[in-house]
């Protein structure tokens, strides 16, 4: 009985998942920052969370960009505009070359497939494109905070082995860039969190490829934990009840009671704006 009791005691204290250790960046995210998100559809998902929390976000302004060269194209088109922070999410090293021009296209615009040639970028080509991204971003703000991530979304159309090779190329390019930059950019391990902490299909959408809302929420919480300043976390707490009130679905939106409720909520929001002038209501 003693052995059995000891077994269940040990079993109860076992850890059945591997927690990714996330280092703190050398900077902190402040409330209502102006943030640029460029990259795969995962950048859209995370960017929308920042948008909900009243950061001044620009999310994939020219569409979703999956590879480093296409990300560079977006940043070059925004060159000169100043952002506090940029979040770059790498999806794949596969690119499509327009045969007529020999250039990488960001979107084939539903043109015939035979007009394009698919190629894969090397680690060095990915790194070189990302160097260009950093240079373009720093023209707008030399002190911009830059966060680099690799999307956890697998690309079934390549085959799962080829998808892993693609991610490995992006991870190696990210590591090379981070080594060169010596603390000037920060790698956030979204890819590792999904694949190591959340390696269960209950954290995926029905296609079994894209992380679901629960997974995105968890990644958001881990990001806030390590990257947000005390002031930013305080703002989130102050904004939460106002956000929830604005999101309330009334039974009768024309009732005087609801109109009074809405007016009180607006007053609370305006009061918060006095404390945080960059808050856009």
Image (tube, rainbow, N blue to C red):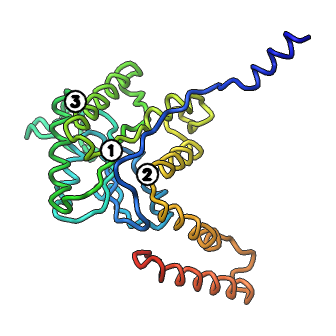
Quadrant (top left/top right/bottom left/bottom right) for the N terminus:
top right
**Tag nearer the camera, 3 or 2:** 2
Residue 7's place in the image compared with 31, above or below, is above
Q: Residue 119: horizontal and vertical position, in percent?
A: 20, 28
Residue 119 appears anywhere in the view: no
Q: In the depicted view, which residue is nearer to us: 28 or 272?
A: 28
- Mark positioned earlier in the residue sequence (1 or 2): 1
For label 2, the residue is: 227
* Residue 83 image-quadrant placement: bottom left
For label 3, the residue is: 118
Q: In the depicted view, which residue is nearer to us: 123 or 189?
A: 189
Look at the numbered disc 3 and give the secondary structure of its residue: strand
Q: Are marks 1 and 2 in contact (CB under 8 Å)?
A: yes
Q: Residue at x 32, y 57 (%)?
A: 85
Q: Residue 57: horizontal and vertical position, in percent?
A: 38, 63
Give the farthest residue toward the front. Answer: 2
Give the farthest residue toward the right. Answer: 1
Q: In the depicted view, which residue is nearer to us: 126 or 11?
A: 11
Q: Residue at x 27, y 39 (%)?
A: 67
């Amino acid at each position: 009985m003693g052995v059995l009791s000891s077994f269940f005691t040990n079993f109860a204290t076992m850890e059945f998942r591997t927690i990714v250790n996330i280092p703190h960046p050398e900077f902190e995210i402040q409330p209502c920052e102006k943030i640029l998100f460029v990259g795969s559809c995962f950048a859209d998902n995370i960017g929308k969370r920042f948008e909900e929390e009243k950061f001044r976000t620009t999310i994939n302004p020219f569409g979703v960009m999956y590879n480093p060269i296409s990300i560079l194209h977006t940043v070059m088109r925004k060159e000169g505009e100043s952002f506090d922070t940029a979040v770059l999410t790498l999806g794949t090293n596969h690119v499509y070359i327009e045969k007529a021009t020999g250039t990488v296209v960001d979107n084939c615009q539903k043109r015939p497939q035979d007009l394009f040639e698919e190629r894969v970028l090397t680690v060095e080509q990915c790194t070189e494109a990302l160097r260009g991204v950093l240079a373009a971003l720093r023209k707008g703000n030399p002190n911009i905070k830059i966060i680099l991530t690799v999307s956890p979304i697998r690309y079934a159309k390549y085959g799962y082995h080829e998808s892993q090779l693609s991610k490995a190329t992006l991870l190696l390019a990210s590591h090379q860039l981070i080594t060169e930059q010596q603390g000037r950019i920060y790698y956030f391990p979204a890819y590792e969190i999904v694949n190591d902490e959340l390696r269960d299909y209950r954290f995926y959408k029905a296609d079994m490829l894209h992380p679901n809302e629960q997974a995105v929420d968890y990644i958001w919480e881990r990001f806030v934990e390590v990257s947000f300043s005390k002031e930013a976390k305080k703002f989130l707490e102050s904004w939460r009840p106002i956000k929830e009130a604005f999101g309330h679905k009334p039974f009768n939106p024309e009732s005087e009671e609801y109109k009074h409720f809405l007016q009180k909520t607006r007053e609370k929001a305006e009061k918060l704006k006095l404390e945080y002038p960059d808050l856009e209501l």
